[in-house]
Image: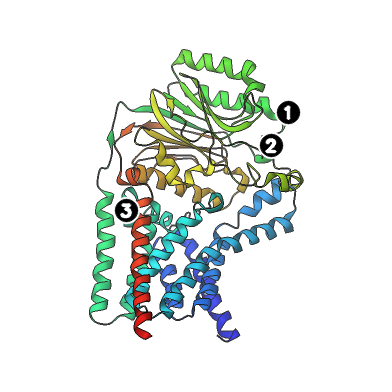
């Protein structure tokens, strides 16, 4: 490859990645995800393995560099590193995450080099893409942001979510991209197959969207979701603790007709034992007398000295949930013995949490078992379904104030909508500065708060029962299917190689 040609094709791949961000919230031009994937596939079909590697890396840099560059905000404003260092660290992270797309391109190029035909290449493309997204979602703690399936929450393809989860929707997106390329590159019968295949994927997705996977169980619950809108720069200032507690208490007392009230992650910016006697216990008694259940975010210090990012139940019941999937460098430090000076330098508040116990019993809210997640725990569908089908509804408490007025807010809301769609459950989303929401089991927004405003959402939800196929199978159904497809294509390559010898 000449240097000029390589730069030209790399710029196309990078532009395709950047363009694909338009498929996600807040833009939600979902068809762009299909077009972006189709464009990078066309590049890969005309590339050697290492050319495809570079083009895949550039695509990933375009997608993530445009879509998650907001990560630098928290490092800059709250990490004590300065703007330049924050941007450098963010770009390093993006460059590393882009390797997943690069490796997918490398393997696809290797398949083509071995004589795999167009049909096998299109099949291999879809399976490799899904497998790379899945691995990115768990390897080294995982970062599943901007998986293509999330972009389809408002498209007919979202009907696949209760069956195969977000990675199944990604498979539908990349299969659509492959069939679109087949319409362009194929001949005669191939174009017919491409057209019919596209029709089936989208029509079946639309049909599945109307299937009632779950049903109501019990009476409606009156709920309130409190968004206090406390700036992150003020949240942990000791002198503002009492005004913060008074604010949340006042907003709550305006909605005592509710069965359940949700406060955001660390709405109480203190340890339980620091405010238990003067604040938590009196509030617990007051709400209990009113028959109201409150779930609030708070830091919990255990007797052994470990502390947790937690959600505490007050009023009708008293329980606590400890966050299990922590944010690397934000909530815990990998290789702590080696990197402790780095953490001290960054001065991120509350950045040495312990992970909660996996498999702990569900927390009961307003008489029903609920699946609780804190912050980006809701980005991991396979972890959310661990509490199902027992959980009657889902709750996510978050604090996206770390990332300012950026794409992080609508993107995170889109992820929460996908969790509701996958599980067939209502999801209550309480955030510090937005975007809070009451999300219906089909992923639609029953009620949503404006960002960066003090606001209380009120409404009704129905406890739900039953299990979607995704709840029963998790990610394994689509992953096994993708592995089978890729294995078939690799076997085809092996057979082609033998015939050429």
- Residue ID at (60%, 58%): 69
Residue assigned mark 1: 239
Earlier along the polypeptide chain: callout 3 or callout 2?
Answer: 3
Which type of secondary structure does the marked residue at label 2 adopt? helix
Front in this rendered view, residue 353 or 398 = 353
| Real-space CA distance between mark 3 and mark 2, rounded to the nearest whole angstrom | 42 Å
In what quadrant of the picture does the C terminus appear? Answer: bottom left
Residue shown at the point (70%, 55%) measured from the top left:
86
Tell which tag, 3 or 2, sits nearer the viewer.
Answer: 3
Query: How far apart are the alpha carbons under marks 1 and 2?
Result: 9 Å
Residue under the point 24% across and 73% down: 193
Counting labels gives 3
Q: Secondary structure at mark 1?
A: helix
Of pointers 1 and 2, the one earlier in the residue sequence? 2
Q: Mark 1–mark 2 contact, CB under 8 Å?
A: no
Mark 3 / mark 1, whichever is N-terminal: 3
Between 95 and 417, the one nearer to me in the picture: 95
Residue 70, image x, y percentages:
60, 54
Q: Position of residue 494 (x, y in %)?
A: 37, 75
Q: Residues within 10 Å of mark 3 (few under 14, many from 20)?
A: many
Is 434 displayed left or right of 157 in the figure?
A: right
Q: Which mark is residue 160?
A: 3
Query: Where residue 371 is drawn, which disc sits there?
Result: none
Residue 361 in the image: state x and y as whole percent: 44, 29
Nearer the observer: mark 3 or 1; the answer is 3
Residue 146 appears anywhere in the view: no
- Residue situated in front as seen by the camera: 495 or 201: 495
Asked if residue 104 is positioned above or below residue 258 in the image, the reply reads below
Separation (CA) of disc 3 from disc 1: 50 Å
Residue topped by disc 2: 234
Instruction: Judge the density around disc 2: few (<14), some (14-19), many (≥20) Cα neighbours within 10 Å.
Output: few
């Amino acid at each position: 490859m000449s240097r000029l040609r390589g730069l030209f094709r790399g710029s196309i791949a990078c532009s395709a990645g950047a363009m694909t961000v338009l498929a996600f919230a807040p833009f939600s031009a979902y068809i762009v995800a299909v077009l972006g994937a189709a464009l990078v596939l066309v590049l890969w079909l005309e590339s050697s393995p290492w050319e495809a590697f570079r083009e895949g890396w550039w695509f990933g840099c375009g997608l993530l560099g445009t879509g998650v560059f907001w990560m630098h905000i928290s490092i800059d404003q709250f990490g004590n590193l300065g703007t330049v260092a924050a941007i450098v660290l963010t770009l390093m992270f993006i460059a590393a995450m882009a390797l997943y797309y690069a490796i997918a391109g490398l393997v696809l190029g290797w398949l083509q080099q071995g004589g795999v035909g167009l049909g096998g290449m299109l099949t291999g493309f879809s399976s490799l893409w899904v497998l790379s997204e899945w691995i990115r979602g768990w390897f080294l703690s995982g970062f599943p942001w901007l998986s293509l399936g999330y972009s389809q929450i408002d498209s007919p393809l979202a009907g696949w979510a209760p069956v195969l989860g977000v990675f199944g929707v990604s498979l539908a997106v990349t299969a659509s991209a492959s069939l679109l390329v087949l319409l362009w590159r194929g001949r005669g019968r191939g174009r017919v197959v491409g057209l019919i295949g596209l029709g089936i994927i989208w029509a079946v997705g639309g049909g599945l969207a109307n299937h009632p996977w779950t049903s109501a169980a019990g009476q409606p619950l009156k709920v309130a979701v409190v968004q206090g809108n406390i700036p992150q720069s003020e949240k942990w200032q000791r002198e503002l603790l009492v005004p913060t507690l008074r604010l949340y208490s006042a907003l709550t007392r305006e909605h005592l007709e509710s069965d359940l009230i949700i406060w955001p992650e660390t709405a109480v910016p203190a340890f339980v034992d620091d405010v238990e006697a003067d604040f938590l216990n009196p509030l617990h008694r007051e709400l209990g007398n009113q028959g109201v259940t409150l779930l609030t975010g708070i830091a919990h210090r255990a007797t052994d000295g470990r502390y947790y990012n937690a959600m505490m139940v007050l009023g009708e019941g008293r329980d606590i949930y400890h966050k299990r999937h922590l944010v690397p460098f934000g909530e815990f430090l990998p290789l702590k013995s080696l990197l402790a000076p780095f953490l001290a330098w960054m001065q991120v508040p509350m950045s040495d949490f312990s992970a909660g116990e996996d498999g702990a019993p569900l927390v009961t809210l307003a008489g029903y078992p609920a699946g609780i997640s804190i912050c980006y725990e809701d980005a991991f569908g396979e972890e959310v379904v661990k509490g199902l089908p027992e959980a009657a509804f889902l709750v996510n408490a978050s604090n996206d104030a770390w990332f300012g007025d950026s794409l992080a807010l609508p993107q995170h809301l889109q992820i929460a909508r996908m969790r509701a769609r996958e599980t067939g459950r209502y999801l209550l989303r309480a955030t510090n500065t937005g975007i809070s929401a009451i999300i219906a089991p089909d992923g639609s927004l029953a009620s949503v708060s404006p960002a960066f405003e003090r606001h209380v959402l009120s409404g009704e939800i129905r406890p739900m029962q039953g299990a979607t196929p995704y709840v029963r199978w998790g990610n394994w159904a689509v992953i096994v299917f993708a592995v089978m497809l890729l294995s078939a294509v690799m076997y085809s390559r092996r057979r082609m190689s033998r015939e050429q010898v």
